[in-house]
Image (spheres, rainbow, N blue to C red):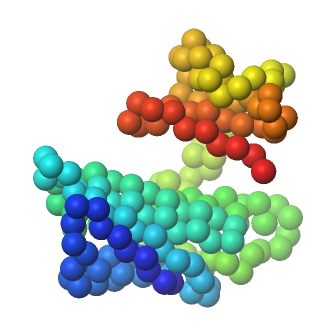
Amino acid sequence: MNFNIRGENIEVTPAIREYVEKKIAKLERYFTESPDATVHVNLKTYQDKTSKVEVTIPMPNLVLRAEEVHDDMYAAIDLITDKLERQIRKHKTKVNRKFREKGNLPEMFVTLDESERTPIEDDHDLELVRQKSFDLKPMDSEEAILQMNMLGHNFYVFTNADTSLTNVVYKRKDGRYGLIEAQ
């Protein structure tokens, strides 16, 4: 793994860099081969002395992403590592189940002992409990945001009137809005 560590309102010291690399590199034990991925780490400090750590690891079939806000940056890095580990375990379980049904197992993940399994890997986590179908009305993103707010949802799927592609608007944690465009 290659590391791209940036700091906003903080200098990335060698000690911080070493701690991040040591913690994130532990995730490699879940893969059969060391992933050829660039780990993007963004460290921020705010005026109220809290720290925010964001980690994104884009890989060919999977994007691992987590963020954590904490008073202690080192604690935030530890929590991020735990979140990413849970994501990998959950994805591994999902992939293994899918390939067991088809009869061929992927070679992307290392097999875990039963003692390493966590409750997160239960079948209940991935259970589909509801399915909806609806027609996507062509509209612009502003109208989609209005529709989303009227429904009281935090995302809304629509057909972009300009591009005729499926788009999603969503409400961000900061109260603003985001747009996801299909390619």
- Residue 67 percent across, percent down from the top left: 39, 55
Of residue 4 and residue 66, the one placed in the foreground of this image is 4
**Left or right, 76 with reference to 157:** left
**Residue 162, relative to residue 139: is it above or below?**
below
- Residue 132 percent across, percent down from the top left: 76, 25
Residue lying furthest front: 162
Q: At x 57% / y 46%, what residue is drawn?
A: 125
Q: At x 32% / y 76%, what residue is drawn?
A: 20
Residue 100 visible in this rendered orientation of the protein: yes
Of residue 17 and residue 61, the one placed in the foreground of this image is 17
**Left or right, 16 with reference to 173:** left
- Residue 74 percent across, percent down from the top left: 22, 68
**Left or right, 70 with reference to 153:** left
Of residue 135 and residue 75, the one placed in the foreground of this image is 135
Image quarter of residue 53: bottom left
Residue 132 visible in this rendered orientation of the protein: no
**Residue 77, relative to residue 37: is it above or below?**
above
- Residue 31 percent across, percent down from the top left: 58, 80
Of residue 175 and residue 23, the one placed in the foreground of this image is 175
Q: At x 52% / y 77%, what residue is drawn?
A: 38
Q: How many labels does the image show?
A: 0
Q: At x 86% / y 64%, what residue is drawn?
A: 102
**Residue 7, relative to residue 15: is it above or below?**
above
